[in-house]
Image (cartoon, rainbow, N blue to C red):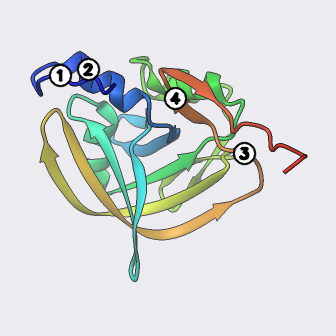
Amino acid sequence: MRSTAPVEHGSRFRDVCAALPAAVCVVTGTGSQGLYGATVSSMCSVSLDPLIVLVCLDNRSSTLAAVRESGSFAVNALHAGQDEIASRFASRVDGTTKYHGVPHRIQDGVPVLDDALGWFVCEVAEAHLSGDHTILTGLVREVGGGDGEPLLWHRRTFRGLAPEDPSS
């Protein structure tokens, strides 16, 4: 039997969204006060011609302010096992402090995490206010990555992919 709830029930909305697995990424940027970064689970590819990705950032985020200021950002997809990095960048700790002990480099003006599964350096194409978040689309200027399994967010817990069944 299906469970339903009126739209105004935010907790039910959050529960249903939590049931959908999402890749965990860190959006990074540089502002006049230093380096910034925020963990997101809302990232997707939008276009192949031109190359465009989409991320959503909380309107109160200092990372969003830095991205608006500089006009650029990077999206760093995390590997399975990088839970601590995801938690650190999800915290309200000072932007530059989040980078302590996290190997990174500045690539085309924005921080890129060295151990990321993959990364995109982007120029802000558009920013759309949508409720308590801003939807950013980014024109991809550079892209890189490696092998490995993604870090996922599912039912409010970090997870990796399920091991493949060798019998199938």
Give me the disc on residue 5.
1
> Hey, which quadrant is residue 65 in on the image?
top left
**Please, what secondary structure does the residue beneath circle 2 have?**
helix
Evaluate if marks 4 and 1 touch, with contact meaning CB atoms under 8 Å apart. no
Residue 94: x %, y % from top left? 42, 21
Mark 1 residue type: Ala
Mark 4 residue type: His
Image height of 118 relative to 65, above or below: below
> Hey, which quadrant is residue 130 in on the image?
top left
Q: Residue at x 47, y 71 (%)?
A: 141
Evaluate if marks 2 and 1 touch, with contact meaning CB atoms under 8 Å apart. yes
Pointer 2 or 4: first along the chain? 2
Q: Residue 70 vs residue 141: left or right? A: left
**Please, what secondary structure does the residue beneath circle 1 have?**
loop
Mark 3 residue type: Glu
Mark 3, residue position: 149
How much space separates mark 4 and mark 1, taking CA atoms?
21 Å
Mark 2, residue position: 12
Mark 4, residue position: 154
**Please, what secondary structure does the residue beneath circle 3 have?**
loop
Q: Residue furthest right?
A: 166
Evaluate if marks 2 and 4 touch, with contact meaning CB atoms under 8 Å apart. no
Pointer 2 or 1: first along the chain? 1
Image height of 40 relative to 55, above or below: above
Residue 127: x %, y % from top left? 20, 55
